Structures are given as C-alpha cells and as structure tokens.
Image (cartoon, rainbow, N blue to C red):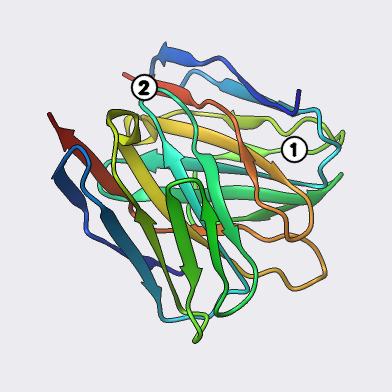
Amino acid sequence: GQQLNQSPQSMFIQEGEDVSMNCTSSSIFNTWLWYKQDPGEGPVLLIALYKAGELTSNGRLTAQFGITRKDSFLNISASIPSDVGIYFCAGHMYSGGGADGLTFGKGTHLIIQP
Amino acid sequence: EAQVTQNPRYLITVTGKKLTVTCSQNMNHEYMSWYRQDPGLGLRQIYYSMNVEVTDKGDVPEGYKVSRKEKRNFPLILESPSPNQTSLYFCASGQGNQPQHFGDGTRLSIL
C-alpha cells in the first residue's frame, strides 16, 4: 500500500516553542487529515483539509494542504504541556463511489521539556 | 454522543484460541475499518467495509476475518491467533469524504 513520509519522527522542545511537522507522498490525495493520539487512546481528529492550497487553523494549530496535493504541514504555536503526544498525518482519496481507507504517516512524537 | 466502541480494551490469550474483537458505531456511518498499530510502522489497514455485506482487504489482511451483517457493527475475527498478531487495534468509521472517527483501541497480546 501507499506510505506517507512524515517528519520529524520525534521532537524534543521547550514549552512555549513553536512546532512544525510535515508529510509528503508520492501519490495525490483529495483530503489531508491531522490526528493526535494520547497514550491509551485512539487518534483524535485535529484538522481536516479538503482543497489544494487550503490553510486552516484550529486554535494554536495551523495546517496547510499543499498545492501539489502531495504534501501537508502542521504547525503548533506556543506549545504547552498538553500538546505532548503522537501526531499523525493521513491522506484520503475519496472517489465518490464510497469512502476508502486512510493512508497514515508513521507519526511525530512530540515531547515537551519543562 | 458520537462514538466508536471497541471491546475488549485489553486481551491476553494463547496461540490458536479463536477470538473476536467487536466494534460498534452509533453514527449510521456506511464505512468502517480496522487498523493495527505497531511501533515504527504506524497505522496499517487490515480490512474495511463500505456498507453492509461489503468487505475488502486492506494492506495487512492475512490472519484476520471480518463481517458486516449490520451497519453499526464490524467485528474483527482472529480464527487462529499467532504471536505476530500481538498489536494495538483500532476500529474506525466514516461517511463519504468526512474524517473517520476512531475507537479507543484494543490491546491484544498473543502468547
């Protein structure tokens, strides 16, 4: 199956710093999603992007759908302790005939040092 | 409240003993899917279903079965579990191009 290249694999940052992570693919998608997973829980949707070039914010989070439809980034501004977790990008190619599976990146593990 | 519910949350069992992990969603979603999550490999799709009685293999279907007799339920069946199926499993549901909702996961340990 397809794979997304998500980077970085892990980030060690100080509280208050900004964070940036991205995903690239060899295939195009018509939806990009960013999820966060806390220990012992399932992934929770943060931001959904539906159009190439779209820039969407959710509080301190900002994500963009790349113009080529093959990449996306997620920025977190002024990080706080509860931002700790694993962040996943996911690409979705919806053909109109029915939903299809998500292709996930391998995740970015965010660790915030006090 | 919109929910995807998996049971059990944790299971330790032995090789060869058939087990079923249930998944139920209350959002009337047509699409349901199972993923497994392993360190360094991320989330990989096992099987998915676009509607009742319609199921298809994902990227890693070997050793698993599913059924979709009703819209709300999508059980994952391991007929003869083996240690390499020790993993964290997630069920998800969705509709059209809307983002999928995930359950809280089932941690399986096969000894």
- Say which residue appears at 12% left-offset and 29% top-offset: A114
* A53 on left or right of B37: right
Task: Look at mark 1 in the image and give the residue it sits on.
Answer: B67
**Viewer-closest of B74 and B3:** B3
Q: Of helix, strand and loop, which one carries label 1? A: loop
Q: Is residue B15 visible?
A: no
**Viewer-closest of A97 and B78:** A97
Q: Distance from label 1 to label 2 (Cα)?
A: 22 Å
Task: Tell me the crowding category of disc 1: few under 14, some 14 to 19, or many 20 or more residues within 10 angstroms, Cα based.
Answer: some
Q: Examine the rendered structure and indicate whether residue A39 appears above or below residue A100.
A: above
Q: Examine the rendered structure and indicate whether residue A14 appears above or below residue B25.
A: below
Residue B16: horizontal and vertical position, in percent? 45, 23
* B91 on left or right of A5: right
Task: Look at mark 2 in the image and give the residue it sits on.
Answer: B110
- Work out whether mark 1 precedes mark 2 in sequence or the reverse, and give the earlier one: 1
Q: Which mark is residue A15?
A: none
Residue A93: horizontal and vertical position, in percent? 63, 70
Tell me, yes or no, whether the two marked residues, 1 and 2, touch with CB atoms within 8 Å. Answer: no
**Label 2 marks which chain's residue?**
B
**Label 1 marks which chain's residue?**
B
The quarter of the rendered structure image containing the N terminus of chain B is top right
- Say which residue appears at 63% left-offset and 74% top-offset: A30
Q: Examine the rendered structure and indicate whether residue A45 appears above or below residue B91.
A: below
Inspect the image, locate mark 1, and give the three-letter code of the amino acid beneath it: Ser
Inspect the image, locate mark 2, and give the three-letter code of the amino acid beneath it: Ile
The quarter of the rendered structure image containing the C terminus of chain B is top left
Task: Tell me the crowding category of disc 2: few under 14, some 14 to 19, or many 20 or more residues within 10 angstroms, Cα based.
Answer: some
Q: Is residue B5 visible?
A: yes
Residue B39: horizontal and vertical position, in percent? 27, 41
Residue B98: horizontal and vertical position, in percent? 72, 54
- Say which residue appears at 57% left-offset and 73% top-offset: A54
**Viewer-closest of A96 and B75:** A96
